[in-house]
Amino acid sequence: MTSFDTSPQLNVWRMLLALAVVFVMLATTGWTALRSDHPVTELQASLSAWEDGSIAGHRLPDPDASPARIARFFATLTDRQQATLAARYPLAVGNMNGAPVELRYRANRVALGKARRVELARMHDSRLNPAGQQQAGRRMHRLESLAEPGRHILAFDPEGSGRVAEVFGDLTEAERISVVVPGVDTDLLTFQRTYRYHSAPVGMARSLYDAEREARPGLRTAVIAWADYTAPSGIGMDAATALRAEGGAVRLNALVRALPGRAPVSLFCHSYGSVVCGVAAHTLPARVADIAVAGSPGMRAEKASGLGTSARVWAMRDADDWIGDVPHLELGGFGHGADPVTAEFGARVLSARDAEGHAGYFVPGTDSLQNFAEIGTGAYRSVDCADDLGTCRAGLSATTPVGRA
């Protein structure tokens, strides 16, 4: 029986099940999961300083100006002036959509260094209990790792649990760009993992980048591990609503609109990340060619056509993924709507036969990763559909132009 069965008995059962889920979430996590972040962040302080600053006697542009306006401003500066601004306002420049990509990398290395020194001091702060000192140590080592030579940090905010985005490949020269949008429990400390490496954003993006290069060796590609939104912590109230997704959608849209060049962009959205992509879909620019979701609890739409996007919508779920047992419905703001892998939803359903569990979609050697790589490189006729009829490839050429289904 599909999620679009309209029998009264089934609808009543769904409502009762959804209410039970909500009750459990309230009882176990409370409403405190919806608490607001700190009123003033280090990033906001850096942006405020930028607003009061100047270079060569000229005031700096509004940091909220369009990426094109910001790009034009930086183009008028010398290399030395750009470097001065990156050193003086590292968090502002490092997160400024429209600033040159290489300058953002440089600014974020400065910001990471400052944040590392803060955590190093906190490790030895007697006012913190042992758990607090240990947490500071973990953050310090993560910041050290992010600041290593050769890493390209496109965005970084140390506030709270932290936000970060990293680029693999040459973003300015890429002919295709992929963005990995992760789900719950994504923050500074979980941005990369040693154990279960491919379940964290860095492992996902690195794995996809390698698979894309193998799929089309002559194509210049770039992949972004994008953890630059405040993701829900655990399977609680935040994960059951679109609150975090709405904030993430704004940031995702801003990222895509600021990407250099005109290369097609493919979004690969895992778990709650698919909620972010679903909420963002109708605002995304036409250069977004694909939105591919894996292990999705729903995209806040009843059908793919309701997402309001010209991008192709792809979906997959492996047989072992527990998300399949979650009610795919929306009731009073709780839940995320229809199941994207059902025929009624209308996405192009991909094979994920070799993937295991909810976090196994980016593991090398799986059908799921290979399918993502084919999409990310525009090799649409090579994808492996979930059925034997090849319906997910219907109407597609090998490299369908952007904006066409």
Image (spheres, helix red, strand yellow):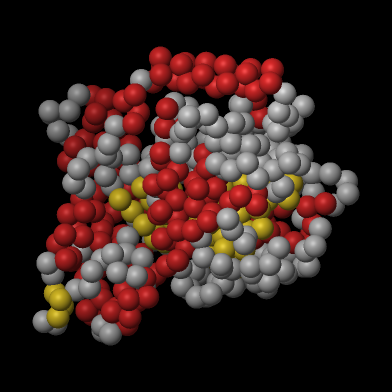
Percent x, y of residue 210: 62, 58
* Nearer to me, 234 or 214: 234
Compared to 305, does 59 lie above or below? Answer: below
List the single residue furthest toward the front: 8
* Nearer to me, 290 or 375: 290
Please tell me which residue is depicted at 72% across the width and 23% down the height of the picture: 7
Please tell me which residue is depicted at 58% across the width and 21% down the height of the picture: 15
* Nearer to me, 42 or 356: 42
Is 224 left or right of 340, judged from the image as shown?
A: left
Compared to 126, does 80 lie above or below? Answer: below
Could one spot residue 178 in this view of the protein? yes
Compared to 179, does 158 lie above or below? Answer: above
Could one spot residue 368 in this view of the protein? no
Please tell me which residue is depicted at 19% across the width and 58% down the height of the picture: 46
Percent x, y of residue 159: 26, 44
Q: Check the picture and name the quadrant holding the N terminus.
A: top right
Percent x, y of residue 251: 40, 54
Q: Image quadrant of residue 81?
A: bottom left
Is 230 left or right of 119, judged from the image as shown?
A: right
* Nearer to me, 43 or 120: 43
Percent x, y of residue 90: 24, 62
